[in-house]
Image (cartoon, rainbow, N blue to C red):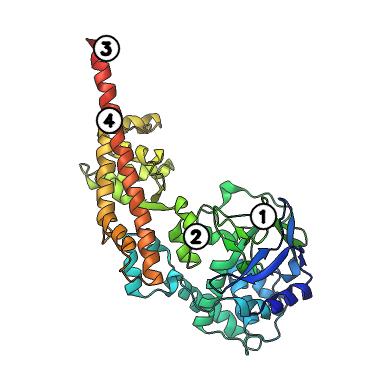
Amino acid sequence: MSEAAITQWLSHNNVQTHPSIQISQSPSGENVITTTSTIPPSTILLTIPTTAIISSTNSPLLELIPSLSEKSQWTILILTIMHESSNPASKWRTYFDNLPTQFDTLMYWTPEELKELDGSAVLNKIGREEAETMYLEEIKPLIDENGGIFQNTDVSLEAFHKAGSWIMAFSSDFEKPGVTRDEDAMDDDDDDEYDSLDMDKVLVPFGNLIQIDCDLANCEFSPSDGSVSLISTNPIPANTTLHTDPGPVPRSDLLRRVGKYPPSSSQHDVIEIDSTLIISIAGKNLTDATRDSRIERLVEEELLEDSYDIEADGGIPSEVLIVIQAFVADDATFEAYAAEEKFPKAKKDAKTRDVVLEVIQRRKEAFATSREQDLAILENPEESLGRRQKMAVEVRLGEKEILRKMEETVRSWADATENHSRSAKRQRR
């Protein structure tokens, strides 16, 4: 896609562009947006009318199929993209022609390639089967019911996956103007945010030209009534590529959604630890009935999650420590907690330490390789790694680094406990 064609589309659709913004090619050959002179912070770089944005509320299909208004934003958006991307005369034709048709997202990895990620919880979040169920049970029936409208549309499963991949990689969630977002009411699953009543999931044309990087971020999108603006967040020198912050998203999830990640996102890596693993170790001396009873009580008290994310610093969340205390406690102690409706505080004692160390060991065993082996793979210049394999090794190594830091953290508890014990003994003498 030529730079002139993109510039012409922006102008034709009344996109206001700062004179110091230009479209150029990166060293890797892809189009990016750069600056020609220094730009101060809080400068409007682009202003895009809402009429030029692809969203469920801006879909021409809503006029053709009024019943679509009862469907989710995802359904409307994906049908809009399938319909418009098949239309040679679409107002978004130039934008669609600029989007990739080959993807490195996990949806497209082979079973052999995915095996490189064994041990990472991201394998449970790919969602290909769920997506294809949605296609068969919701998308395809809608298409069949409106055959005349979709007669010139590529309605294949491949086209559905391509549209979904564009949404996963390049969409944004914007608050609807005039609505205050209730964070407590939001679903924890990022991919379900498009169904929030106070959010719009949209594709901003040519937003894909803006790179993502946590450390290099220098601009951000800001929606308002009638438009979406791209605004500088700090001074941007001349000849600088524009970057937005992908947010606190681990590399594993960016790989799942986008098919790539910047090195800076390693600071947001997490390793997921399933609560069933914690319970099986902390409660190994309990009967099945007792474990089930405690699980039920903790769920009622909203103290038990399905899993826990351990962040890049290796710190152990207090919720994990509380769960461990609840399952290592004897029956009398737990019943006292339950009777008083007051559950244990997060403790860093010897029992808790031993449980966490065993959890760490079991979590390590879920991976097919060790941290040292992964380091050797990445450091060996003679090792020929494909792009996907390299990313898989980096992602799983990032998770193992967190386990290493967890272990360092937990073993430091023992040192602190021993020092406190020796100090107490000296005081008693």
Name, please, the residue furthest toward the top. 429
Q: How far from the left and from the top, in percent, is residue 361?
A: 25, 49
Q: Name the residue nearer the viewer: 309 or 10.
A: 10
Which amino acid, by three-letter code, is at mark 4? Answer: Asp
The residue that mark 1 highlights is 236
Position above or below: 366 against 152: above
Q: Closer to the observer: label 1 or label 3?
A: 1
- Classify the position of the N terminus by image quarter: bottom right
Which amino acid, by three-letter code, is at mark 3? Answer: Gln
The residue that mark 2 highlights is 262
Q: Name the residue nearer the viewer: 428 or 132.
A: 428
The first of marks 2 and 4 along the sequence is 2
The first of marks 1 and 2 along the sequence is 1
Whether residue 295 is visible here, answered yes or no, is yes
The residue that mark 3 highlights is 427
User: Residue at (53%, 77%) from the top-left corner?
Assistant: 162
Which amino acid, by three-letter code, is at mark 1? Answer: Ile
- Classify the position of the C terminus by image quarter: top left
The residue that mark 4 highlights is 415
Q: How far from the left and from the top, in percent, is residue 140?
A: 54, 81
Position above or below: 374 against 146: above
Dot 1: element: loop
Dot 3: element: helix
Q: Are marks 1 and 3 in contact (CB under 8 Å)?
A: no
Position above or below: 220 against 388: above
